[in-house]
Image (cartoon, coloured by chain):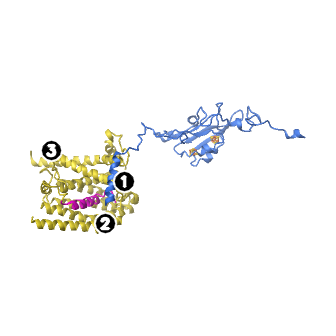
Amino acid sequence: MFSMLKTLWLVFKHAFHKRVTIQYPEEKAYLAPRYRGRIVLTRDPDGGERCVACYLCAVVCPVDCIALDSAEDRHGRRYPSTFRINFSRCIYCGFCEEACPTYAIQLVPDVEMAEYNRQDMVYEKEHLLINGQGKYHGYNYYKVAGLAIGGKAKGEAENETPPVDPKSLF
Amino acid sequence: MNPTIQTLLLIQGVLVGLLTLAGLLVWVERRLLALWQDRLGPNRCGPGGILIFVADGIKMFTKEDWIPPGSDKPVFVMAPAIIVVTALIAFTIIPLAPGVSILDLNIGILFFLALSSMGIYSTVLGGWASNNKYSLLGGLRMSAQMFSYEVFMGLSLMGVVILSGSLNLHDIVKAQSGMWFVVPQFLGFLIFLFAGLAETHRLPFDMPEAESELIAGYHTEYSSMKFGMFFVGEYVGVTLISAIIVTLFFGGWQGPLLPPVVWFFLKTMCFILFFILLRAAIPRPRFDQLLAWGWKFVLPVALLNLIATGAIALARGN
Ligand code: SF4
Ligand code: SF4
């Protein structure tokens, strides 16, 4: 009985405590700098698309919300001709970002994505592709990969020596 | 003015006042619970969020009104009406000011007890008619709870009746001009408070609802305005119990300076706020604890209180 009265009094005293509510649209909660929010497709330092349409993100996505089609440009570089993310399904787990071999797909700390129409939650490539490099500056997949591609021969990548012809030993 | 018209106007006033109050209480309760839980509560719609009850009302009215297949249809439809109607009728006997009440019954307390027990049928029948095991459990709990708490609800009021020598609420208020009955009848007041809480099935006595165990208890299957009726009924019930407590134990409309109606309203509001504080602070007990506590502790105390009051009144010779 006494403990009940004490409870009542303690709860009553809470009327004078500081509120924990954050009045959202006017006040904003603190978001960690690496908070996982809206997904973007980034470009490399030269302005080319990073994504090589490898489908790894689409495969790893636990809710299957990424859909893309691959294409090849005249240098033989693969790129996604369409890239679609359904944000009404995405759970912002960040697996796609971890799976991506080229740092193309990245989650940025933007959470204000509410829409009145559900179909507006489906983002196409033009909505996803940004003009910057996102979190990883100066990274260019083709510059570090030992792959011969249009405009870059074998051995011309960074930290790579020209290939040795083993037959020259003979 | 013609007394009939006067009564009609009074009925109109009380009805509109009560239903508005019930609506406002939705907002008051949510804001106050928020206040005691370090939150803000609804504060967007209208000044301080007060229009939330209008928004709630529109929401309720526009929802699908669904009657579950296999339910007992007439009973299902009637159940929510019972609680509102009985609570509203019980209000007719409350003295709002000296000589002002819709009905001046000389058996006022009995009338109130009868109607408040009638209100329970709403819950029991609603639970029974829903054709849902959770509803049925809720209804069963309500009947068991009512059975055990109704007993000493009446007993706790008998002390007041002995002291004032009347069952008429007007006379009881007048008898408190020297001293509020809460002083000589403190035990009676406490017991009535418990019984009243159980009667309105508010937390911590909201066993029939018990969201964490029974989904929503007896009104699991109710939607739209039928659910709204249960809600309004609950708030009118809380107002009624508060008004009765004020009338019987806290001098009713009596008070200095301010007009009697204002005093009555203020005191009633205090108790409504106290009910909300109880909800914010005290967890729900286990059902068997609730019943055991009622039968093994409160009932004997209520009897002792009655015997002691009777003995003292007899010794004093009045
Ligand atoms: S964050 Fe997770 S759920 Fe969202 S697209 Fe990437 S892998 Fe799929
Ligand atoms: S975003 Fe990354 S993982 Fe997804 S297809 Fe493009 S390169 Fe592959």
Please tell me whether mark 3 or mark 2 is closer to you in this view: 3
Which of the numbered marks, if any, corresponds to residue B66?
Answer: 1
The answer to whether residue A130 is seen in the rendering is yes
* Number of residues whose C-alpha sits closer than 10 Å to that of mark 2, classed few (under 14), some (14–19) or many (20 or more): few
Q: Quadrant of ligand 1?
A: top right
Magenta residues, dominant SS class = helix
Q: Is residue A165 magenta?
A: no
Task: Give the image location of residue B95, x and y in percent.
Answer: 16, 52
Q: CA distance from mark 1 to mark 3?
A: 51 Å
At horizontal 61% and vertical 38% (from top left) the residue drawn is A82
Q: Is residue B185 magenta?
A: yes
Which of the numbered marks, if any, corresponds to residue A114?
Answer: none
Task: Give the image location of residue A157, x and y in percent.
Answer: 74, 35
At horizontal 12% and vertical 50% (from top left) the residue drawn is B98
Please tell me whether mark 1 or mark 2 is closer to you in this view: 2
Residue to which mark 2 is pinned: B293
Please tell me whether mark 1 or mark 3 is closer to you in this view: 3
Q: CA distance from mark 1 to mark 2?
A: 38 Å
Q: What type is the residue that disc 2 sits on?
A: Trp
Q: Is residue A90 left or right of residue B297?
A: right
Q: CA distance from mark 3 to mark 2?
A: 42 Å
Residues tagged 1 and 3 counted as in contact (Cβ below 8 A):
no
Please name the color used to draw chain B: yellow
Magenta range is B184-206
Q: Is residue A146 left or right of residue A25?
A: right
* Number of residues whose C-alpha sits closer than 10 Å to that of mark 1, classed few (under 14), some (14–19) or many (20 or more): few
Q: Quadrant of residue B247?
A: bottom left
